[in-house]
Image (tube, rainbow, N blue to C red):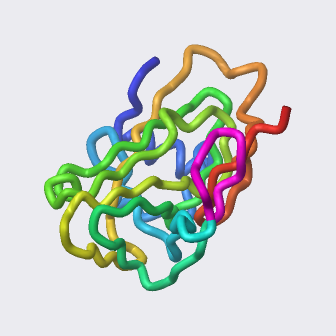
Amino acid sequence: MTVLSDITIKQMVNRGELIIKPYEEKNVAGVSVDLRLGPGLLFPDYENMMHISLDEEIKYREDSSMIIPPNSFVLATTLEEFVLPTDICGSVEGRSSVGRRALDVQNAPHIGPGFQGNITLELHNKNPLPFPLKVGDSICQIIFYQIDKKVDIPYQGRYLGQRGTTGSRLRKR
């Protein structure tokens, strides 16, 4: 795989091969695109669960206050929506300036070729104090990789087309 440069990313977006909406060219730099925080957080609804397991759905409560309590985990979303071509995948990484404030930003290991939708982020406030956020905050970045060939089977997972913050979806067997 080859990491895409800022020049290649801009060219692909301008040709409509890689779709990022809303797109702001100033957010493209080096080998990444800065991503901004979208509206709404999902909090695991611990008060209405006995435990968390891989066998049962997680209950969430939505909160628009955009404040992460101390030592808490929440789900968030990117403001940007994506349509990746079938020969491009992505990796979302936290920003150093955010991590140095003890806010961890994670997501699934990679964004598969052919993915469409917003990217759900997992945020963990490791501080003993609340961490207020605003819609539009630059919170993480995505790095794109060129795959040697277009994939036969593009991303068809349970998060295809997700809009906004999306909780965990169990795989139905």
Position of 79 with respect to 2 (left or right) is right
- The residue lying furthest to the right in this view is 173
Where is residue 137? Give x, y as percent.
34, 71
Position of 141 with respect to 90 (left or right) is left
Position of 169 with respect to 142 (left or right) is right
Q: Residue at x 61, y 33 (%)?
A: 112
Q: Nearer the viewer, residue 15 or 19?
A: 19
Q: Residue at x 57, y 31 (%)?
A: 88
Q: Quadrant of residue 129?
A: bottom left
Q: Quadrant of residue 2?
A: top left
77 magenta-colored: no
Where is residue 136? Give x, y as percent.
39, 74
Q: Which residues are magenta?
A: 49-59
Where is residue 68? Give x, y as percent.
35, 72
Residue 166 seen in the figure: yes
Q: Nearer the viewer, residue 171 or 16?
A: 171
54 magenta-colored: yes
Residue 22 seen in the figure: no
Where is residue 156? Give x, y as percent.
77, 36
Q: Residue at x 60, y 57 (%)?
A: 50
Please identify the quadrant where the C terminus is shown: top right
- The residue lying furthest to the front in this view is 50
Q: Indicate whether 69 appears above or below 154.
A: below
Q: Indicate whether 90 appears above or below 146.
A: below
User: Which secondary structure is most common in the magenta stretch?
Assistant: loop
Q: Nearer the viewer, residue 46 or 171?
A: 46
